[in-house]
Amino acid sequence: MNSRLFLWAITSSLAGLLFGFDTVVISGAESKIQQLWSLSGTAHGLAISAALWGTVIGALIGGIPAAKYGRKKVLLFNGLLFLIGAAGTAWAWNVYSFFIFRFIGGLGIGISTIAAPLFISEISPAKDRGKLTALFQFNIVLGILLAYVSNTVISMLVDDAVAWRWMLGIQLVPAAIYTIMCFSLPESPRWLIVNAKNETEGRRVFALINHDMPENELDELVASVKASAEADSKVKESAGKFFCRRLRYPILFAFLIAAFNQLSGINIILYFAPRLLGLAGMEDPLTASVALGVTNLIATFVGVRFIDVLGRRTLLLIGCVGYIVSLAVCTFAFFNFSVLKVVSAAIDADNAAAQVMR
């Protein structure tokens, strides 16, 4: 694989790392934020979920600027959103400013889910496309793990009163690195040829990616991109066929998979892991939450490694069983650990009372 191509794919996939980091880093700060501004349960939930609202909107509109202004510009703009979101939440002066800056960070997350995988797929040769596009998903779970580790380390080194600001502000470091690295990216060759109508520049980028490709094959590659764009435009003209009876159930099934993935409650676990682990009886919930990030990373490795060996359907069934088992175990552990903690506290209180009476 071309080392230049790999570097470009790594750079753009760092948007996934920021996605995962921004999603989870709030878990170490949310409890202190609620205490600081005396938030009710509703206000607290709205403040923490601000990033999710931004993510939804960013994902819905992300394709528009990517098509109009180019993938590279949108990736750079993403970096700016992450920088603003991290700095703003770290220095938030009230819950309203916190909500706004979390929302801005969420916009960056949503747009990155469109722009980064799109850019990677358009610069990748067919033989490497699967591996390179998987980098985005890998970086998401790596970002989740790094956020849990970062929260744990900061809680050990920084005063508790301001630790939450450091937890949120530390994202400025990876966001700055990502933004600077994005300046080295080329524009997507497909966007240059199809949207910007600049075949010469698009061909030049293809030549950088496929440095050993003969001239005639480069010409064929450019021609195939143009032909693919024409075919796509014809499909858009007959978009109604997308929802025909033959495709109705596969589309519904794909939608339900994504919906149940969220309805499983995974975001609650990611956003409130330390609080939940603390309620379940863990003495050091921040450190314990790192195990969630490690598990997530290992599971992603396994999925990427075996997706072509076992097939999508088999992995999907394994994942469904994993959901059922893990949620059942979580429910059992949460209830029993909490009960044991209460019983243990009651026994300690009785023993203390007995000592006083003696």
Image: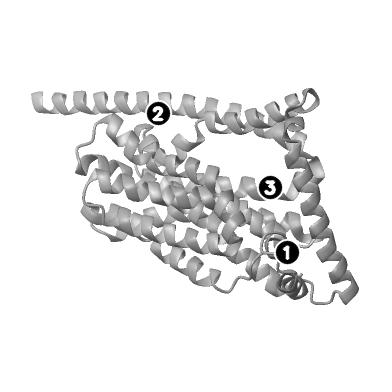
| Nearer to me, 241 or 245 | 241
Q: Nearer the viewer, mark 3 or mark 2?
A: 3
Position of the C terminus by quadrant: top left
Q: Amino acid at mark 1?
A: Ile
Q: Residue furthest left?
A: 357
Residue 207 drawn at (x, y percent): 77, 74
| Residue at (49, 29) in percent of width and height | 330
User: How many neighbours does mark 1 have within 10 angstroms: few (below 14), some (14-19), or many (20 or more)?
Assistant: many
**Residue labelled with disc 3:** 302
Which residue: 53% across, 56% down? 17
* Residue type pointed to by label 2: Phe
Q: Disc 1 versus disc 3: distance between alpha carbons?
A: 37 Å
- The answer to whether residue 39 is seen in the rendering is yes
For the residue carrying disc 2, how many other residues have a C-alpha within 10 Å: few (<14), some (14-19), or many (20+)? some
Q: Nearer the viewer, mark 1 or mark 3?
A: 1
Disc on the earlier residue, 1 or 3: 1
Estimate the spatial distance between the alpha carbons at disc 2 and disc 1, rounded to whole Å. 60 Å
Indicate the amino acid at tag 3. Val
Q: Is residue 101 above or below residue 245?
A: below
For disc 2, the marked residue is 337
Asked which secondary structure carries label 3, the reply is helix
Front-lying residue, 98 or 332: 98
Residue that carries the numbered disc 1 in the rendered image: 193
